[in-house]
Image (cartoon, grey):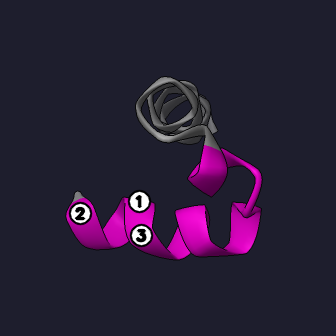
Amino acid sequence: MGLSQSNMGQALKLRPTEYLAPPITSLKDPALN
């Protein structure tokens, strides 16, 4: 969960629009990593 929160924090700074969409961010986070 720690990594997920870290990615969420970075995503929030990089693109807050994605942070508002948890389902999309969750799918994109693992795909990028």
Mark on residue 28? Answer: 3
Residue tagged by mark 1?
Answer: 29
Quadrant in which the N terminus is drawn: top right
- For the residues labelled 2 and 1, the Cα–Cα distance comes to 5 Å
Q: Position of residue 5 (x, y in %)?
A: 61, 32
Q: Nearer the viewer, residue 6 or 20?
A: 20
Q: Disc 3 marks which amino acid?
A: Lys
The reply to whether discs 2 and 1 touch (Cβ–Cβ < 8 Å) is yes
Q: Nearer the viewer, residue 7 or 21?
A: 21
In three-dimensional space, the C-alpha distance between marks 3 and 1, rounded to whole angstroms, equals: 4 Å
Q: Amino acid at mark 2?
A: Leu
User: In what element is the residue under mark 1?
Assistant: helix
Image: 3 above or below 31: above
Residue 28 located left or right of residue 32: right
Discs 3, 1 touching: Cβ within 8 Å: yes
The image quadrant of residue 2 is: top right
Residues shaded magenta? 17-32
User: Magenta includes 21?
Assistant: yes
Disc 2 and disc 3 in contact, CB within 8 angstroms: yes
Instruction: Give the residue pinned by disc 2.
Output: 32
Please report the residue visible at 23 percent of the width from the left and 63 percent of the height from the top. 32
Q: Is residue 13 magenta?
A: no
The answer to which image quadrant residue 14 occupies is top left
Bin the neighbour count of mark 3 within 10 Å (Cα to Cα): few under 14, some 14-19, many 20 and up.
few
Mark 2 vs mark 3, CA separation in Å: 6 Å
Q: Position of residue 3 (x, y in %)?
A: 48, 34
Q: Secondary structure at mark 3?
A: helix
- State the image coordinates of residue 4 (x, y, percent, origin top left): 55, 42
Residue in the picture at 23% in, 57% down: 33
Q: Residue at x 41, y 59 (%)?
A: 29
Task: Assess disc 1: are there few (<14), some (14-19) or many (≥20) residues with their C-alpha within 10 Å of its C-alpha.
Answer: few
